[in-house]
Amino acid sequence: MLTLFQIFKDATLFFSRATPNLATVIPAMDHIDKVLATCSDSPDQFWPAIRAALAIRKKASNKYYNKTDHSEVYRIAMVLPPRRKLEYFKKHG
C-alpha cells in the first residue's frame, strides 16, 4: 500500500495537470476516498490523531463529492467519453 504522503503527492500532481477532466477526476476521487477510509480505520497503522484528521478530511471530501449529483456538467461529462464512462460504472455502478 502506498504511503499517505505518496497518495497526496500523486493527487496533487494529477489535479495540477492542465488536462484533468471529470471522466478521469471522479475515479481519482474514488481512489482517494477509499484510501482515506482504509487509513482512518487502521488503529495499528496510525496514531489516533492522524486517523481522526483523515476521517475529517474524508467527510469534507464527501461533502464536495456529493455535490456532483446536482451538477449538470458532471452528468454531461459522465456521458462522454463512452469508454471511460463504461469503465467507471462497471466498477462503481
Image (cartoon, grey):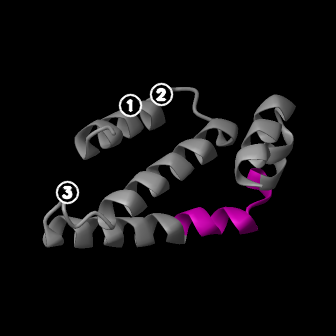
Residue drawn at x 55%, y 51% as measured from the top left:
30
Element class at badge 3: loop
Residue 47, by quadrant, is bottom left
Assign the N terminus to one quadrant of the image.
top left
Q: Residues within 10 Å of mark 1 (few under 14, many from 20)?
A: few
Q: Are marks 1 and 3 in contact (CB under 8 Å)?
A: no
Using the image, determine if residue 82 lies above or below residue 60.
above
Q: Is residue 67 highlighted in magenta?
A: yes
The residue carrying mark 3 is 45
On the image, the x and y values in percent for residue 21 come to 64, 36
Which of the two discs, 1 and 3, labels the residue nearer the N terminus?
A: 1
Residue drawn at x 34%, y 40% as measured from the top left:
7
Residue drawn at x 47%, y 55% as measured from the top left:
34
Q: Are marks 1 and 2 in contact (CB under 8 Å)?
A: yes
On the image, the x and y values in percent for residue 49 come to 15, 71
Task: Give the numbered dot on residue 75.
Answer: none
Residue drawn at x 45%, y 50% as measured from the top left:
32
Which of the two discs, 2 and 3, labels the residue nearer the N terminus?
A: 2
For this orientation, the residue located farthest to the front is 44
Q: Main secondary structure of the magenta part?
A: helix
Residue 28, by quadrant, is top right
Instruction: Nearest to the eye among marks 1 and 2: give it.
Output: 1
The residue carrying mark 2 is 17
Q: Is residue 53 highlighted in magenta?
A: no
Q: Nearer the viewer, residue 10 or 16?
A: 10
Number of numbered discs on residues: 3
On the image, the x and y values in percent for residue 20 come to 58, 33
In the picture, measured across the screen, residue 28 lies left or right of residue 42, that is right
Look at the image and give the residue range highlighted in magenta. Answer: 64-74
Using the image, determine if residue 83 lies above or below residue 85.
above
Element class at badge 1: helix
The residue carrying mark 1 is 13
